[in-house]
Image (cartoon, helix red, strand yellow):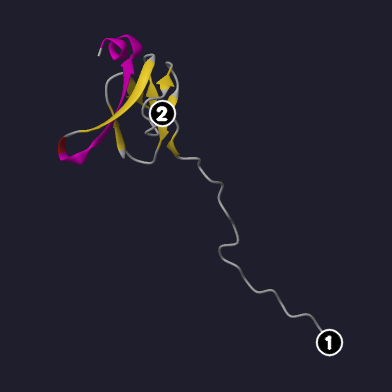
């Protein structure tokens, strides 16, 4: 008696879309207010001067300037946007 074999049951036959996380503007690049600097899950990077953090932990610029990464206490990584006028003077 010829017949096709059953396919069986697959519990995880789905695939999720990639979330496009990561650093969007690197150190030394210019940012304008509203530019997204980092998309992340949790606070791997913390907001510094000239940036703010969204409810999904996205870090974005609130002033125009140059992106700068620094380390703080307990090896916390901070992201800053230094205004262009300050960079020229220094």
Q: Residue drawn at (39%, 14%), measured in percent from left and top? A: 64
Above or below, comparing residue 74 to residue 66 in the picture: below
| Label 1 element class | loop
Looking at the picture, how far across and down is residue 61, in whole percent? 38, 21
Quadrant in which residue 38 is drawn: top left
Numbered mark located on residue 2 in the image: 1
Q: Which residue, given by chain and number where applicable, does mark 2 sit on?
A: 37
Q: In front of the other: label 1 or label 2?
A: 2
Which residue is more in the foreground, 84 or 32? 84
Q: Nearer the viewer, residue 43 or 31?
A: 31
Q: Quadrant of the N terminus?
A: bottom right
Q: Position of residue 60 (x, y in %)?
A: 39, 24
Q: Residue furthest left?
A: 73
Within-10-Å neighbours for mark 2: few <14, some 14–19, many 20+? many
Front residue of this view, candidates 6 and 56: 56
Residues under labels 1 and 2: Cα distance?
Answer: 61 Å
Around disc 1, counting alpha carbons within 10 Å, would you say few (fewer than 14), some (14 to 19), or many (20 or more)?
few
**Quadrant location of residue 26?**
top left
Q: Which residues are magenta?
A: 74-89
């Amino acid at each position: 008696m010829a017949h096709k074999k059953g396919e069986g049951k697959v519990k995880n036959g789905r695939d999720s879309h990639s979330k496009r996380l990561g650093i969007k503007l690197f150190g030394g690049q210019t940012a304008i207010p509203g530019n997204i600097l980092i998309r992340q899950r949790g606070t791997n990077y913390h907001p510094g001067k000239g940036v703010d953090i969204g409810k999904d932990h996205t870090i974005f610029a609130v002033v125009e300037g140059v992106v700068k990464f620094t380390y703080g206490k307990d090896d916390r990584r901070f992201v800053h946007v230094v205004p262009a006028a300050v960079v020229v003077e220094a």
